Each structure stands twice: as structure tokens, then as C-alpha cells.
Image: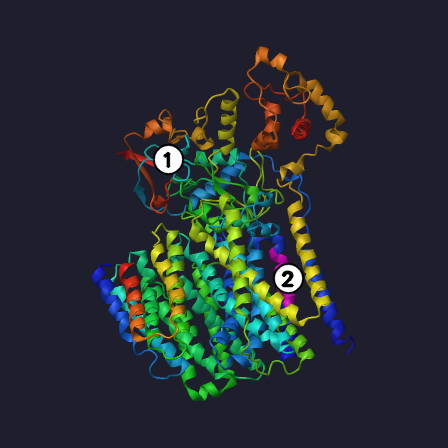
Amino acid sequence: MVKKLFIVGLILLIPGIWTLFQALSIGPASWALDQSLFWGTPIVNFVFWIGLAHAGTFLSAILLILEVRFQKRISLVAELSTIAAILVASIFPLIHLGIVSRFYFLIPFFNERNIFANFSSPLIWDFVAIFVYLCISIFYIVTHLLSLKHASLLKTRKVLAWILFPLVLWVHTIVSLDFAVTTNNLWQGAYFPIYFILGALFSGLALVVFLLEVQKRRVRKIEELLIAASWLLFVFWIWEFFQKGVWHFEVVFFGFVIVQLLWIPVLRKQKAFRLFVSFSVLISMWLERYVLIIPLDIEWLPVDYGWFALGIGLFLSVFFGLYLLIQKHNPLVFYVSAEESNEKYSRKVLWGILAGAVVFALLYFALNYPLDTSVPLMNWIPVLFPLFSLFAGLSFFALGVYSVVPKKQFFLVSGLLVLILGGAFGAFYAGGDTNLGVESKIISVERVSKNNRPVKDLWASRCASCHGLKGEGNRKFIYEFYPEIQDLTLERLNSQGEDSLTQVVLKGRAFMNPFEGRVSEPEARALIRYMYQLAEEKE
Amino acid sequence: MTPLINALACLLALLPASFLWTSPRSIARYGISQALILLCFMLFTFFTGDMEDPMMEFYPLKMWAFCLCVSTLTLTKKRTFFMTLAQGLWFWIVFFGSLSLAYRGEPVNNLSMILLFFGMIGVQFFKQNPKEISLGILIYWVGIWMLF
Amino acid sequence: MLISKRTFIKSFGALLGGLLLFGCRKQGEKSLSRVRPVSIPDIKKQIKEAMKNQKPLDSLVAIPVPSSLKAFPNATNRFGMAIDLDLCDGCGECVLACNLENNIPLVNEYQASKNNYMHWIELRDQIPVTCFHCGDAPCEKVCPTGAAVHSPDGVSAMVYARCAGTRFCGVNCPIKIRKFNYVDALDEGLQFISNPEVPVREQGVIEKCSLCLHRIQNARLKAKTIGKEFLGENVTTACAEACPKGAILFGNWLDPNSLLYKKARGRGVYTLSSIAPFDPSVVYFKGVR
């Protein structure tokens, strides 16, 4: 069954990749959008898949903390589904961008390269939260797999579970804020955070029911949880009706009415029926997001359908691919219960790392805050908390792995990672092509600007009489006829830009004479670039 | 919302708190009882509150969190742990609710959040709580509810 | 079996990877030859189509005359416009002038059939609607990259080079006046360049009314060159210039000598009800106060 589903996933990836290709090459016009509906089906799928990721963490990390017994039997499957679902979810917002290659504009680095993310925007919070969630989930599952051999890692697992506990709720809360902070009446609601968290858990539980059935296993407690969540969500739908007068019968039918059939023991015994309920819940939760984000009737394009293939195909192939890989090394791993230990970190280490994380978050804040004091203090917390978690999680993970893995191997891998990350950071710092506009590519100045010789001559013959050979101004001449000439500085050049300065040369302005006819447009542009050079030399 | 209605809401939230965890039930039944309590709070808010006021959007949730907080006083096992969690839920609802309302120009009440945060830390110091301290904590929560 | 499972999976993976790389490849260079010659009949045709299917308009509500911005309390300028609804008859000349001034691309037939035009000014119920340059703009709050920013002189500006196209600003605009470049207008031959001062926008960025920022900057430079403080004299927007009734006024809300400031005296100042909470800089004049 596992292998079959893996193959199904791979086959579904074929239309999935086609969809990805369409979306990347055509851009947002390839799915249903218009000038009043800017967020479409990718966002629906993003919210859906990130919601599915949550149950995995809930069932493994949160129930570990709450010391619920059935957690031990299913934790590895749950963790694996989290990883696969986050990977799927993180694709959608990236494709959704108008210019995908500019995704790094959303990373809240320091104000390097003058790209400063707006800390008031929930999308920045989203980016940080999901990135950290993915990192810590990976740490968590790696710790789990390592702990099968090295029992001393069990305490690391517990600590990571504590870090994941608020973080997972945080992620979907932030997703809900993407909607709750807008001016759209249908998206407003101070109850959204809790509503979204419940929705995420609900759909995720349904997914875990399905994944366990694939393994021919059944955990009754999860079905109970499913019923409990359906009731709570039902109440939230009622509250939404009170607030906004919207009521979606299909969502309630698939998400609430059908789930109640689990009360009938005869039906509940049937495997097919349990699968039916879990799919019904998944459909309901997908629809819920759809009717929220796209309230109008729109005409779907092929890519809108393709997202299903992409999402499901990628999830199945990643999940079952990893599943098969892990099973190959340790055939019984999915059926044994995770161990527990009462061993704990010493207080010194615990508080030391937490204090380090607090210092890290505060340092980040102190370095960034002066750059943008217009952002209210409250809006910084959604960025600082995930960073705090990342620092703490990384420290505990590194500490745990260090204690069990051979030192040589540890330093090799971590050195390699540092090298890669450092390289990426360095590449980012160095920057690439800053030639952004279309029209700067249109007009080539190669002809006149080669070796700077001709431009220099042009400058000397046309401009130097007033502006001076080095752009310092020919004072003797100017003072007789014109007011004080402007200083040639890079800042001033940048403030006006190459295009408008080219126009100034051609058309003239105030006391500057028009040079149209005497210099061509490419020549004028080359002169401006020469001015940049002069300004640079001066500074 | 007038102070009188606010006080009524406080009483209503206290009502189910005492017998929330008394009889052992299945998870599904616990879920249903929680949902029904939440529904009662929503109906209460809908009929007594001014629905134009954005603060009402998360009022029933706050009542629910308050109710859960108080109900932890009846627990015998892992009381401090669940007290922290329940206050965390309350803090969560208020913090993120206010954050989204702040974008609509609603004033943010920082003090209640700070008090809840300190409450979360504070309960850690009362591992073995005699009745007096339980009463003190209850008064602390009611105070937060009534004043902010 | 002709190929082993391992080979199948390997080659499948390679195929997927290759397709992915192909999808991410860099697009070719743009060339000027794709620029369409300016054809006023073409532009007029699309304006006419847009005017035929006008969107509904929110109700108008009275607001006070715009004053200093909260974010820049010491600024001397707050540029804005007023549209006199007593004079305006919805002829659409302003839309044409705006299109020519700002090189607004035409749209292809598919977008036109869905009534998606790029016009920065739209007529809704015969009333011209454009970006209101809100002082407390909702779009700027949610833009993750800072591409939508407020200039100290009151213009809600768009930095195209910073825009990553998340479209959050468009989502959060209460009147949905921001326009997204769904297609590459240069590539599809929909782009004309009638004004070299205004850059051509790329595919994937949001654009909207800039209050003819290039004109303001030119006038500012002129004033700076002769050493005068710039308060927005000798400059007006393309739409204001083109209006045959003189119904559109451009000016500085903080300068008592500005025509806009003077004309606002005694007039009823209105805006759309959905915009009212955000302190707009562009307002409607209607009747007397």
C-alpha cells in the first residue's frame, strides 16, 4: 500500500510539475485572478496545507508534553506528515509572488543592501514563523530517529517538544492574521486566531486518520478528537454567522454532519467509512478556506486544478518516499512506541540557553528597531518570538547531537553547514545585478562608453566649460552668468536617477541648456554614467 | 458593554468552571461540553453585547478562557501546569485579538496582557497551594476580568 | 520488466529536476522593438469599454479638509487633489490624459473581456476614482517589502524595484484601485511609451496613481536650482491639466497660497465611505459646506 501510494504520488507529480511550469512561466495570470481579486487558489492551498502540518506536531509534540499515552505509537508518522505538509505549503506562497526571484525581499535581514522588510506586515511574520517551524520540525524528527539508538537524546526531544508547542500554534495564528488585519469585512475578526488553529488541527487529524489507515492501524482516540474538534469548529461557524451573516452549508455538512456519523458503532467499525469521514473533513476544510478567500464566483483555469495534483503528488511522494527510506533502515520503526525517559537537562544548561535566546532576540530587536521606529512595539513580537525559538531549538539540537555523534563527523557537518550558510549570506551581501528597469536594457551605451575615452572627450567638449573637467564647476565662467552650480555627489545623482538626468541633458532645465541635436540620447546617457564615475572618484 | 453586563458575564463564566472536570468522560464528550459552554457564551454576548463593537468579536472566547482558568483550581493533578496553559490561552486570545484590532484603529489594552503574563509566571511559585492562595489567584483573575 | 524500479525512479527524478530548472530559467532580454507606437484610438477604445462597464461606487461621506499628516507632522507639503463633482460630467478625458502621461499599457483581449484594465483613474458611476493617497494608508501597512511607502510630502508612492508582487496592498485597498501587471506588456506588444520620464512597469508589480510624481520632482528641482522653497507651485497633474471643465485641482493642502487650499474654503469636502477612516489626500468637492 505504501509503495502504491508512493507511485501514485510520483504519477500525480507529472501534471503537478506541468502546473508549476505554467505558473512560473506565465505568472499569476495563469490562475484565476483579476484586478479586484488578488489572492487566489494558491493562498487557499497554502492555508490548507499548512493547516495539515499542524496535527503532526500536535499529536507528537503537544501530546508528549501533556503525557498522553497513545501519542507514543503514532509520533513518527505524525512528524513525517508535518515535514511533508510544510514542504508542500511553502511552495504556494512562493509561486504566488508576482516576481518569484524577489522572494528574498521578504526575509527580515538587517538593513543590508537597503532591503528592509516592513515589520508591520503579517507576511513577514509568516515567513519567519514558517521557516522556523520547518527548521525545528526537522530537528525534532532527526532527534527522534537518533534517539532510537541513543537514549540520551530523549531529553532533547522533550525540550524541542516544549519549543514546538507554542510555535505550532503561533504559525497558524499568524496565518489567520494575514486575513484578520485587512480592511475586508469578511476577513476581519478578533476570534480568527483560535478559529484558524482549530481548523488546522481538525484537518490535520483527518489526515493522520488516513495515514494510519494506510499502515493498517487505528487509534480510537484520534477519532474521538476528530468529533470534539468538529463540535468546537461548528460553534465557531455559528459565531461567524452571528458576526457576518455568512453560513456555508456545504462546509458544515462535510465538516460537521458527516463526522457525527462516527457515533454509530456499526459504521465506525468499517475502515472504508472512517476513510470516507477523513476525506469529508479534508474537503470541508479546503472548502472553508476557499469560500473565505474567494467569495465570488470565478472561472477556474487549468492551473487552478493543477494545484491539487501538485499538492497531493508532492505530499504523497515526499511522505511515502521518506517513509520507505526510514523503513529500509529500521523496518519496525513505525510500529514501536517512542521511549520516554525521566532524565532532564541540568538547570544551568536550560536557563543558559533560554537566556541566550532572549539575548539573541533582544539584540536583533535593538539592531533593527532604530531603522523603523514607526512600527508599534507589539508588531515586533511576531518576529522576535520565532527567532527566539530558532536560537533555542538550534542550541538544544546541536547540544544533543554533539553528545552522541562522533566529534569528527559533527564538526565536519556543522562546518559544511556554516560554510554553505556563510556563502549564501556572502552572496546576498555582495549582491547581483542591480539593473532593474526595463528601459535601461533597451538603450545600449556600449558604443560611446567603452574605455571611457570618447565620453571623456564629449564631456570635455560639451560640458566642461560650465561643469568643469572633474564636475567641480568652472567657477570663473559660471559666476558671471549663472547662480551657484550644484555639487556633484552620488547622493544627488541617485536622487534624480539616470533617466531623468538624461532627459535634463536633452531637454534642458532652468539654467541648463538643452543639448538635443548636439548629443544623441545614448550619448547623453553615457554622459550621465560618466558623471556617476566622476562623483565616485571624488568620494 | 456596561460594567453590569461584564459582571454578569463573569458570573456566567464562573458557573460551569466548578464541574467542568469532575466526571470522567471520553474525549468526544469533553469536546462537546466545551463547545456547548462556548456556544452559551456566544449567545450571551450576542444578546447582551453591542455587536457593532469590535471588542465583542472575541468576548466569548475571553469568557471561555476565563472559565478554563478558574476550572483549573478544581484540578488535583498537574494543577500549576494547566493553570499556566489556561492563562496562556487567555493571553493568546487577548494578545492576537488586540493585535488584529489595532490595525482597525482600536485601542490596545496592554495592562491586561502584562498582568496575564505575570500571572503565568506567578503561578509557578505556588506549587503547593493552600486554599487561601487559590482564592487569591481567583481574585486576581476576576480582577483582570472586571477591570480591563 | 525492461527497466528496473531503481532506474525508473532515478530517471523520473532527473526528469522532474530538469523540468523544474526549465521552468525557472531566465527570460530573454526585452527589446525596444516591442514598444507599440502610440495609438490614441486604441487607448480611447479601451477607455470607452471600461466606461461602459463601470463598477459601483460607495456612498460619499463628508470629511474635514485634509491637514498635516500624522506620520510627518513637521512637513510643509501635503500634495493632494480635489475633484469637483459639481463640474465633473464624467467625460473620461482625465483617463486618457493619465494613460498618455504614465505610459499605462493596454490590456489583452482576455483581460479586457473580464473588464480588467490598467487605468489609474476609473469612472465608477460616472465619478472619477483614483488612488486617494490616504495619510494612514492600509496598503502601506501590510506591504511586506516596503514598496508601498509614504513620501514626506503626502504621496503614497510605489517603488517598483522593491515590489515582489505579493499583492497584499491590493487585497487591503478598500476600493481596489491598485492594478497588478498580470502580463508582460512589452512582450505582448501592449506597451507604448508616450512619456519617457515615466518608467515602464515590469510584469508582476503593482502600479497605481503616483500624483504625477515626476512632474512634482521636476518642479522641485527647478525650485531647488534657483534656491526657493518648494511648496508645489507651477505644477499640476496630467488629469487636472486635461479636464475640460477644470474640475480637477492639484495643490498643497498645507500651503495657504495654494489654489487647492483656497478653493476648499466653504466647499463641502467628501470622500468614499470606505476610505473615510484613512485620511485621504484626494477628495471630492460637492456643494457648499
Name the subunit of mark 2. A
Tell if the residue under mark 2 belongs to the same chain as the one under mark 1.
Answer: no
Residue positioned 38% across, 57% down in the render: A188
User: Which color scheme did the rendering employ for the protein?
Assistant: rainbow
Residue A163 in view here: yes
Residue C166 in view here: no
Looking at the picture, tell me which residue is in the foreground, A304 or C282.
C282
Task: Please give the label number shown on residue A462.
Answer: none
Give the residue type at disc 1.
Answer: Ser
Residue at which label 2 appears = A18
Looking at the picture, tell me which residue is in the foreground, B83 or A446.
B83
Circle 2 sits in a helix, a strand or a loop, which is it? helix
**Which picture quadrant has residue A85?**
bottom right
Quadrant assignment for the C terminus of chain A: top right
Q: Is residue A473 left or right of residue A451?
A: left
Quadrant assignment for the N terminus of chain A: bottom right
Name the subunit of mark 1. C
Q: Residues within 10 Å of mark 1 (few under 14, many from 20)?
A: some
Circle 1 sits in a helix, a strand or a loop, which is it? loop
Which span of residues is magenta-colored? Answer: A13-23
Mark 2 → mark 1, Cα distance in angstroms? 53 Å
Relative to C83, is C22 above or below?
below
Residue at which label 1 appears = C68
Residue positioned 34% across, 84% down in the render: B23
Of all residues, the one furthest to the right in this rendering is C2
Give the residue type at disc 2.
Answer: Trp
Residue positioned 54% across, 48% down in the render: C109
